[in-house]
Image (cartoon, rainbow, N blue to C red):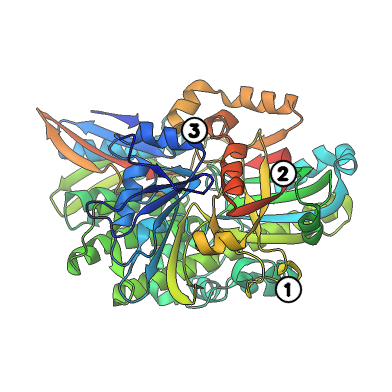
Amino acid sequence: MTYEYFEHQADVGIRGRGKTLAEAFEQAALAMFEIMVETKDLQLTEPQLVEIEGSDLNDLLIAWLSELLFLKDVEGKMFSRFEIKSISENKIIAQIYGEAIDPSRHKLKLEVKAATYTQLKIEKNNKNWIAQCLVDV
Amino acid sequence: MSDLFTKVPNKINLWTIEKHNKMNVPAFIYGDQKIIDELKADYRREWSATRQIINVASLPGIQKGMLAMSDVHPGYGFPIGGVAAFDVESGVVSMAGVGYDINCGVRTMVTDLTKKDLEPQKKALMTELFQTVPAGLGKPGKIKLSVAQVDDLLVEGAPYVVNMGYGTEEDLEYSEERGRIKGANPRNVSDRAKRRQHNQIGTLGSGNHYLELQIVDRIFDEKVAKTFGLFQDQLIVTLHCGSRGLGHQIGTDYSRELVRTSQKYNLPLPDKELGSAPITSKEGEQYISAVNCGINAALANRQVIAHLVRQSFQKVFNIDIRQLYDIGHNTCKFEVHDGKEVLVHRKGSTRAFGPEHPVLPSSYRKVGQPVLIGGTMGTSSFILTGTELGMSETFGSACHGAGRSMSRKAAKKRYWGKTVVQDLANKGIMVRAHSFAGVAEEAPGAYKDVEQVVNAMHDAGVVKKVVQVKPIGVVKG
């Protein structure tokens, strides 16, 4: 279970990998937050529960990442630990852990504006899942 | 693929891709030989700008031609530097043609100071600007708005914040749409988008957004420069930002919605990312109205920042500064061209209306609209003016900036933020940034040559160069 970035001229591609679909989604989320902050600096507080719905798996990945960006803005938080409790074609239930942004302790980097349908791909290769898309920065 | 692009006879820097396969119109691309060679070399890549140009030319109701400006590069379905106008009856509106940073744009303000006047106070002014203008990730603005107040702001645009004391009536006169576009109904914007806005009004953001002190370095057209109030060695200020979280959320909401709408109306989409709706459909009307809300939010955002910049100048120099113009470069707008109403998408493209256009402020009407082109930190920016040829060829549109030539990942690998800052300091450019990683990604070397991009459009006659400006101080997120 890991994540990586792939090249794009203007923006950044994120790719989560895992043995399960849930792990791939969790890693994609971590990849997205690592663009914005040194996630290792976050001191995690109480988890919060999120429930996301989508029309299919592709839509679900965009919905998942978009929800996290929404929470980042309205709660002024960064997240670095994602535990997907259940995932189906149309729904995710997850616990996420993060901390309120504190510029004195957190190394803040580049803001992600949105997760996009560009280069969006969710697939299983051999025994591993990948979940990827381009994010707008 | 060498014959995909044909040079248009008797034209300078204009190329065409003939209508083929599913294209409804040909494509027209502005660029010198080098720009075209780069597009050709990149064509085979799955997500190349050229493929996106061809895809957009295949959308229903597109008029005349899919246009690509000289700074064209791959975007989300729709190329950045792309312009596409659609018939209001048979055409579509596409979320990809506006993007996630609705009405991201540029505002330039001018001072009566020269480079020499600035020097002794430069550090003090930069410190003041860095402290006064909220920039960088997570930095809240000074104004907090409830959802109900956000509703009013979305309808009223920049005049809403001018009424709160942020700026003057004159600022509105020198903004696109006079600071407020009509047809903005906040009911078409989700509560989530409004909640993202509550403390983000008047914030610069991060990435390629900036606030720059610039010096007029070269004058190409004395007469127009004078009309715009520009002179040699003059200090001017330019800021670049958009509609922040609200615009990003509108983009996110409708990108998902319009993928479903495209299926509902059986729109022949060559790429899922081009999620569209018929302009006359309920969904199309809702999206256009939401975009108008985003346009107003961005106009208000730049209005507040402009006011903070003005306060900083008052504090350090005890002088007032005047607004030159405010333009957006991620929009779709109903406009009349050649006597016909069309919906013009400009994705990473600037409106560039020519002389005598009735929407221009009366003092600029004889010479055309100021067209503000952002360069990169270490190079230069340009102020151009629209032309009659641009009105007839590009729906009154031009390039918007340098356009990236290197991915962020590659830039970060190649440049180190602190070194970039030092290199710029050696050139007399003071950088104040909240993130050094951000600076590395925006390193001047990661962009195309802005002079080449601007010259390609100027030589084609779509715009006319007025002045070139050099940065001398940069505030980044």
Helix, strand, or loop for circle 1?
A: helix
The residue positioned 62% from the left and 60% from the top of the image is: B387
To the question of a shared chain for discs 2 and 1, the answer is: yes
The chain under label 3 reads B
The C terminus of chain B: image quadrant:
top right
Amino acid type at image mark 1? Ser
Whole-percent x, y for residue B29 in the image: 44, 47
* Mark earlier in primary sequence (1, 3): 3
Q: In this view, does B146 lie to the left or right of B356?
A: left
On the image, numbered disc 3 is attached to which residue? B34
From mark 1 to mark 3, how far is it between C-alphas? 39 Å
On the image, numbered disc 1 is attached to which residue? B362
* Mark earlier in primary sequence (2, 1): 1
Residue A112's place in the image compared with B259, above or below, is above
Residue B320's place in the image compared with A126, above or below, is below
Find out whether the residues at labels 2 and 1 contact each other: C-beta distance under 8 Å: no
Amino acid type at image mark 2? Gln
On the image, numbered disc 2 is attached to which residue? B468
The chain under label 2 reads B
Residue A131's place in the image compared with B197, above or below, is above
Residue A28 visible in the current orientation: yes
From mark 2 to mark 1, how far is it between C-alphas? 24 Å
